[in-house]
Image (spheres, helix red, strand yellow):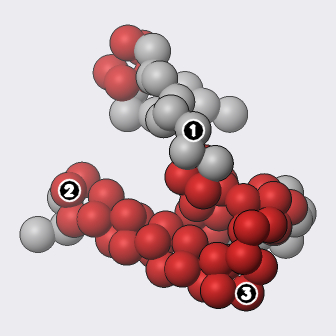
């Protein structure tokens, strides 16, 4: 019920909502604004990740590749 797929779909929904809001408010500068917002020191980790993913999608960048070790450890090796 609350597995990885459920969390991923909730994350994807949050990213899509953020993209819609940023596009509506900032138009062509949406990706730049998302990157700036992600760098704010008061953001919690989840909010920062949503903003970073929104910026990545707005710039049509490829998703980051994860190493075998990172996949095996479930992302725990990130700092």
Tell me if residue 12 can be seen.
Answer: yes
- Pick the front one: 6 or 24: 24
Say what secondary structure mark 2 lies in.
Answer: helix
Q: Please identify the residue farthest to the front as the structure is shown.
A: 28
**C-alpha gap between disc 2 and disc 1:** 23 Å
Query: Which residue lies under the disc numbered 3?
Result: 25
Expressed as whole percent of the image width and height from the top left, the position of residue 65 reads 47, 23
**C-alpha gap between disc 3 and disc 1:** 21 Å
Say what secondary structure mark 1 lies in.
Answer: loop
**C-alpha gap between disc 3 and disc 2:** 30 Å
Q: Quadrant of residue 8?
A: bottom left
Please say if 67 is above or below 11.
above
At horizontal 64% and vertical 86% (from top left) the residue drawn is 24
Q: Quadrant of residue 7?
A: bottom left
Tag of residue 61: 1
Please say if 17 is above or below 9.
below
At horizontal 54% and vertical 52% (from top left) the residue drawn is 57
Quadrant in the picture for the N terminus = bottom left
Q: Please identify the residue farthest to the top as the structure is shown.
A: 68
Expressed as whole percent of the image width and height from the top left, the position of residue 79 reads 68, 34
Expressed as whole percent of the image width and height from the top left, the position of residue 22 reads 67, 78
């Amino acid at each position: 019920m609350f597995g990885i797929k459920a969390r991923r779909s909730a994350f994807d929904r949050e990213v899509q909502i953020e993209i819609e809001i940023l596009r509506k408010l900032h138009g062509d500068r949406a990706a730049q604004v998302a990157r700036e917002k992600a760098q704010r020191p008061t953001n919690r980790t989840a909010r920062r990740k949503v903003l970073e993913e929104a910026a990545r999608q707005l710039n049509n960048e490829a998703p980051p590749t994860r190493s075998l070790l990172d996949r095996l450890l479930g992302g725990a090796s990130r700092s």
